[in-house]
Amino acid sequence: MTTFDEEKIRNGVPDAHIEVHSRIDSTNERAIELIRQSNLNSPAVIIAESQTRGRGQRSRKWWSGTGSLTFSYVTFLEKDETESRPSTPSGLISLASALAVSDAFKSINPTLNFEIKWPNDVMLNQRKIAGILVESVSTDRNLFSVIGIGANINNANMPTLQDMDDQRESPETTTATSLAQVSGRANSLSDTLIAILIELEKQISIVNKAPLEIVDRFNQVLLWREQAVFISSPSGATLEGICQGITPDGGLRIKTKNQIEVIYSGSLQKADSTA
């Protein structure tokens, strides 16, 4: 028996194509398959009770267990009028998705203080509570954004991210938490999902019409802003400096001893801590 109320979800987002899987390789992979195999003309939501090959940022595996909320949301990207590419930088879609998750959590738990670790990890009490992987997919007719979200909702025992990811090579040891662990109560996965989906529709609309609003709001909840941080790039190079916020295209501005650097990919940590 599924832990999701499919009828409630369909009523909550009536215009979306909905799939609920008890077990699947990856919700993002299924979403991309759906785009390739059909003339998708509405948003789509692929939900999994469990997934065997979930993916996170930088090819990491995404750990999910009992009480997790794991799904992918497919939305259309607005095209540049002269070129076959998104008119909005993909980095801003990532920021908007993180804001959507954070705002949905805040609506459910108004007393809790959520922050976002660049580029799109939602944090609670310096611990990771949700991660996001955004992928762009192009067909002959349309451009799509596949937003994969893994959130810790009712999980009882949370490991460190090193335990969660057997592909990790960086020294990052961020620990995870769940809404239930902090709030002391269980949450409806279906209601939480609907809250996130409603916020996703809202924030994607804003990022297409007023992208600087997304940047301003993200800067307000950015973890470690104006603090010393270091970034490990995918190549293994590191950069240390003061986190100065987000650029209009979604990059992270770092003030080093010599200049201002803008970073678009990497693993961010606080300079004086491994937390």
Image: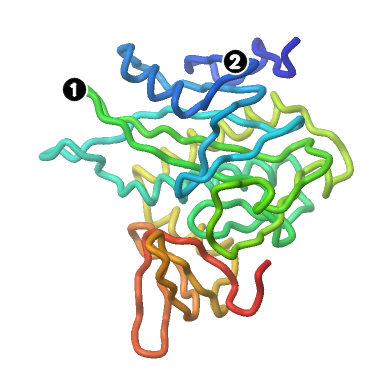
Residue 274 screen position, x and y as percent: 65, 70
Give SS at disc 2: strand
Q: In the rendered structure, which amino acid carries the disc numbered 2?
A: Val
Within-10-Å neighbours for mark 1: few <14, some 14–19, many 20+: few
Using the image, determine if residue 165 lies above or below residue 33. below
Residue 159 screen position, x and y as percent: 75, 48
In terms of depth relative to the viewer, which is nearer, 268 or 41? Answer: 268
Within-10-Å neighbours for mark 2: few <14, some 14–19, many 20+: some
Q: Is residue 10 left or right of residue 265?
A: right
Q: Residue at x 33, y 58 (%)?
A: 249
Q: Residue 43 sits in which quadrant?
A: top left
Q: Residue at x 42, y 44 (%)?
A: 206
Identify the residue at the far bottom of this view: 257
Q: Is residue 233 left or right of residue 103?
A: left
Q: Which residue bears the numbered disc 2?
A: 20
Q: Which residue bears the numbered disc 1?
A: 140
Please state, as top left, top right, bottom left or bottom right, where the C terminus lies in the image: bottom right
Give the label on residue 184, or none.
Answer: none
Q: Residue at x 76, y 10 (%)?
A: 1
Q: Is residue 268 left or right of residue 112?
A: left
Residue 184 screen position, x and y as percent: 89, 44
How far apart in space, not on screen, are marks 1 and 2 (Cα)? 27 Å
In terms of depth relative to the viewer, which is nearer, 55 or 135? Answer: 55
The disc, 1 or 2, on the residue closer to the chain's N-terminal end is 2
Using the image, determine if residue 129 lies above or below residue 22. below
Q: In the rendered structure, which amino acid carries the disc numbered 1?
A: Asp
Identify the residue at the far right of this view: 184
Residue 248 screen position, x and y as percent: 35, 61
Q: Residue at x 65, y 25 (%)?
A: 50
Say how the picture is coloured.
rainbow
